[in-house]
Amino acid sequence: MTLRLTIEPELPRLRAQARRLCKNDSDASDLVQDTVLRALTFEAQFVVGSSLRAWLQQIQRSVFISRYRRSCRERRALDRLAHDPCAWTRRDAPPVMSRLTANAEVALSGLPETFRHVVELVDLAGYEYRDAAQALDVPLGTVMSRLHRARRVLAQQLTDTQVEAASPKRAAA
């Protein structure tokens, strides 16, 4: 006799246990279905002569616990999304800047034209990388590379400017 034929008499007990676990007929039916599916999938692991009822009940408990843990993780993730505005997948509108500081304008104007255009489009105008690549008629990787290098140069120039402003001036003797 195959396992498939011996599972059918166990279904009423599985349904009753599923109702006790789930407290909901729809979820209980899903649990029984998943239990039978897993039992049939792992049919080769069943030891002939052992208790089929105990094996099926253990599978059902495992499926129930896995579902419960997954639903807890999903609820925590949704709670985080609801309370953390930074966690949303949609980007917020870029902040509206009236103008750059004088130091930033000088540093930006000192960049080579190809780098400056990428920074203006992506960082100042809020373009996506793809849109900037289309506007400049260059590959996406080129935009990313230029932007990385331009930001590095700007950061260094602005740091140097701040260091120069903070250092004490020597009086001419």
Image (spheres, rainbow, N blue to C red):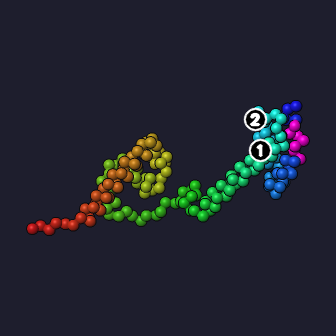
Asked if residue 35 lies left or right of residue 114, the reply is right
Residue placed at 77% from the left, 44% from the top? 59
x, y percentage for residue 11? 87, 44
Which residue is painted at 77% across and 49% down in the image? Answer: 61
Could you tell me the amino acid type at mark 1?
Ile
Magenta span main SS? helix
Position of the N terminus by quadrant: top right
> What type is the residue that disc 2 sits on?
Gln
Vertical relation: 47 (above or below) 123: above
The answer to which of marks 2 and 1 sits earlier in the sequence is: 2
Label 2 residue SS: helix
The answer to whether residue 89 is above or below residue 43 is below
Specify whether 123 is left or right of 165: right
Above or below, 107 against 171 in this view is above
Q: Is residue 120 visible?
A: yes
Q: Quadrant of residue 40?
A: top right
Residue 39 percent location from the top left of the image:
78, 39
Task: List the residue tagged with mark 1.
Answer: 59
Q: Residue at x 64, y 58 (%)?
A: 76
What stretch of residues is rendered in magenta? Answer: 6-12
Q: How many marks?
A: 2
Residue visible at 52% across and 60% down? 93
Quickly name the residue at label 2: 45
Q: Residues within 10 Å of mark 2 (few under 14, many from 20)?
A: few
User: Is 155 part of what is drawn in magenta?
Assistant: no
Residue 8: within the magenta?
Answer: yes
Looking at the image, residue 168 sits to the left or right of residue 108; the answer is left
Quadrant of residue 124 in the image? Answer: bottom left
Q: Is residue 33 visible?
A: no
Q: What residue occupies the far left of the structure in this picture? A: 173
x%, y% of residue 49?
83, 35
